Image: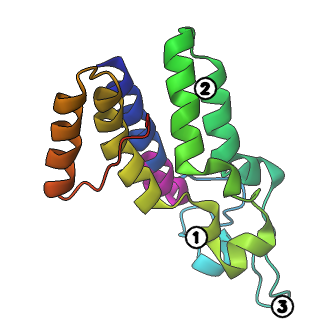
């Protein structure tokens, strides 16, 4: 149950970072008192310069890989920490590059984890873990056959 909650929590953190990150006000917004910042000035682009400047603190806040690594270091239970690390490995978090102005302006989607991998791992890992705890070979075979017939495509990794 704890493992499912940890996986669910990680999914919520990722989705929150994805959805709320662009809404975070920062010091790079330039507006007149009582006025509304234009999209070009809120990104640090002025009509004369046409360049993007983003404060280092904002770039650090966009580093999802570092945020998730730091969160894992605060887990006290060794079992939960090991499960968290296996989730991070399955999510392929290490493939996310560090945020940079170039990445943000050319392809900001590179800064996000592959949501297909995240969803797949979050759904299949509890089923795989349950299957690994089955000791009777016939029941284990039935379990994996049932999962595959149901469309999960999960194989017995203990063989």
- Chief secondary structure of the magenta portion: helix
Residue 7 lies left or right of residue 134; in this view the side is right
Q: Which of the numbered marks, if any, corresponds to residue 72? A: 2
Q: Please provide the residue range marked out in magenta.
A: 15-23
Q: Residue at x 14, y 56 (%)?
A: 149
Which residue, given by chain and number where applicable, does mark 3 sit on?
Answer: 48
Q: Residues within 10 Å of mark 3 (few under 14, many from 20)?
A: few
Q: Residues within 10 Å of mark 2 (few under 14, many from 20)?
A: some
Q: Residue at x 57, y 40 (%)?
A: 88
Percent coordinates x, y for residue 99 in the rendering? 74, 59
Regarding mark 2 in the picture, which secondary structure is present there? helix
Residue 156 image-quadrant placement: top left
Which residue, given by chain and number where applicable, does mark 1 sit on?
Answer: 109
Q: Residue at x 19, y 59 (%)?
A: 151
Percent coordinates x, y for residue 111 in the rendering? 64, 62
- Of labels 3 and 2, earlier in sequence is 3
Measure the C-alpha gap from mark 1 to mark 2.
Answer: 23 Å
Q: Are marks 3 and 1 in contact (CB under 8 Å)?
A: no
Measure the C-alpha gap from mark 3 to mark 1.
Answer: 28 Å
Q: Residue at x 77, y 56 (%)?
A: 98
Q: Residues within 10 Å of mark 1 (few under 14, many from 20)?
A: few
């Amino acid at each position: 149950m704890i493992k499912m909650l940890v996986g669910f929590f990680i999914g919520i953190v990722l989705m929150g970072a994805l959805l709320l990150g662009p809404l975070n006000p920062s010091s790079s917004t330039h507006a007149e008192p009582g006025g509304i910042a234009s999209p070009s000035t809120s990104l640090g682009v002025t009509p004369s310069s046409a360049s993007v400047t983003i404060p280092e603190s904002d770039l650090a806040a966009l580093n999802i890989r570092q945020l998730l690594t730091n969160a894992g270091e605060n887990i006290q239970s060794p079992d939960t920490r090991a499960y968290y690390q296996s989730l991070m490995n399955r999510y392929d978090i290490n493939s996310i590059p560090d945020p940079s102005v170039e990445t943000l302006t050319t392809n900001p989607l590179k800064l996000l984890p592959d949501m297909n991998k995240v969803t797949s791992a979050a759904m299949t890992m509890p089923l795989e873990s349950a299957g690994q705890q089955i000791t009777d070979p016939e029941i284990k075979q039935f379990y994996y056959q049932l999962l595959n017939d149901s469309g999960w495509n999960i194989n017995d990794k203990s063989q």
